[in-house]
Image (cartoon, rainbow, N blue to C red):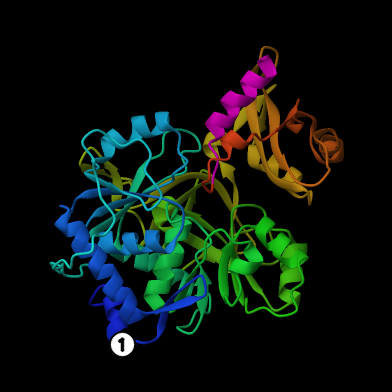
Amino acid sequence: MAQLSDWPWRHWAKQRPQATAVIFEQQPVSWLMLQRQVEVLAADFQRQGVLPGSGVLLCGKNSYPLLLAYLALLQCGARLLPLNPTLPTPMLAALLPDLDIDFAFSPDGLPELPPGAIVLSPPGVDECYLQLLPWDEQRLATLTLTSGSSGLPKAAAHSYAGHLASADGVLQLMEFQPQDSWLLSLPLFHVSGQGIVWRWLAVGAQLVVREMQPLADALAGCTHASLVPTQLWRLLSEPMAKHALKEVLLGGAMIPVSLTQQAEAVGIHCWCGYGLTELASTVCAKRADELPGVGAPLPGREIRLVDQEVWIRSTSLALGYWLRGELVPITDEQGWFHTRDRGAMEQGELRIIGRLDNLFFSGGEGVQPEDVERIFAAHPQVLQVFIVPVDDAEFGQRPVAVVDLEGELTLEELMLWAQDRLANFQRPIAALALPDELKNGGIKISRRRLQKWASSQLQA
């Protein structure tokens, strides 16, 4: 990984000006051209009033214009908040006023904005003079919303150094060279999408940006990708006589051994890992195998288990949570971040058992939803599954399954399939189909919203 003394796109434009930086659809963009496009856009944002430290909301689906705006706003020194365009209006109304947003930009159209925020217009035709801000790794760069799976999301504030430290840890494990290309397959409003961008910038490799294409088409020519297991299953089910894919970083669900064996058989190396928004993406990773763990800590990360809770110290740790103009500390006095994840060390690697916050009791028995979800997720026609508690007068709470299926499998058939694989207290009293309105376009779905929805369905 290069030592940067300038903005990464400027660094690579000096080192290898004509080398390909981005492949947009099928069109290559050189590092020199990328630098020019970013700086023209940054100058236009400066003309509209964006100053170092300005809070700027960036909203949209992945696209080349969105990527350019991400880089240009960083070069302005903005405190950049990439936002999921499908977040519900009531959540935005509760969340945004505390995040000090001065400006907003979107290539696709904006959601409801916080009071007083100025909408940035697309770049004008006139040339603007860029006031070049010095590169400073320690500067606050981005605010990234946590999943909010058990409450209102928090805004984790990362420096450039944190993003680059995250990239460095992964790059010491996975082979990613300047001639390689990584598909921007995950959204920029999620930390895993930004992780792809910072690995690309750290190496000076190629980033592939393709909009609204089937995965197999989007991956054409790509050597690297970040995928969830369902995407890899679908990719392998299609004819793959010729492909360039060498390395895949998997996340988001339990990873079946049969899947990774099938991928390895066609020359695709599979890696699985564990990461958090507060840690700027991946903390632990390993070459996928038959063991249920997530590997050992990457360089620059330390892990400690305290009463089964995973604590982490890392060079990629967020500076804090941004709230009303201040950074709220997220570590204890020794610098440990308490994740609220339950874990155990097994056979030399970390195994994640589930969230401490998710544990509930049914008839005096502790139900860890993730344990039950792993059973259901082993069925090849289950895309996503969530176990949530609903109140019960006799048992206190009972588990309910909310499931996203593909194919012709019915909920009744799935429940029958899982019956003998679960203990009595783990068996859901009902199974509900995951509704489209709760698939909010993010990587994670709010468990609290699912629980509220499931309770209302059963009451009805």
Residue at point 32% right, 60% down? 69
Residue 4 horizontal/vertical position (percent): 28, 77
Three-letter amino acid code at the position of disc 1: Gln
Q: Quadrant of the C terminus?
A: top right
Viewer-side residue, 55 vs 308: 55
State the image quarter where residue 137 is shown.
Answer: bottom left
Residue 250 horizontal/vertical position (percent): 60, 62
Viewer-side residue, 136 vs 345: 136
Residue 67 horizontal/vertical position (percent): 38, 62
Q: Residue furthest top?
A: 393
Residue 300 visible in this rendered orientation of the protein: no
- Check residue 449 for magenta coloring: yes
Residue 129 horizontal/vertical position (percent): 13, 68
Is 394 placed above or below 248 here? above
Q: Quadrant of the N terminus?
A: bottom left
The reply, left or right, for residue 197 in relation to residue 421 is left
The reply, left or right, for residue 454 in relation to residue 87 is right
- For the record, the magenta segment spans 444-460
Viewer-side residue, 56 vs 121: 121
Query: Which structural element holds mark 1?
Result: helix
Residue at point 35% right, 80% down? 31
The reply, left or right, for residue 208 in relation to residue 70 is right
Residue at point 28% right, 80% down? 11
Chief SS of the magenta region = helix
Residue matched to label 1: 15
State the image quarter where residue 225 is shown.
Answer: bottom right
Residue at point 31% right, 64% down? 71
Q: Residues within 10 Å of mark 1 (few under 14, many from 20)?
A: few
- Check residue 142 for magenta coloring: no
Residue 451 visible in this rendered orientation of the protein: yes
Q: Residue furthest front?
A: 125
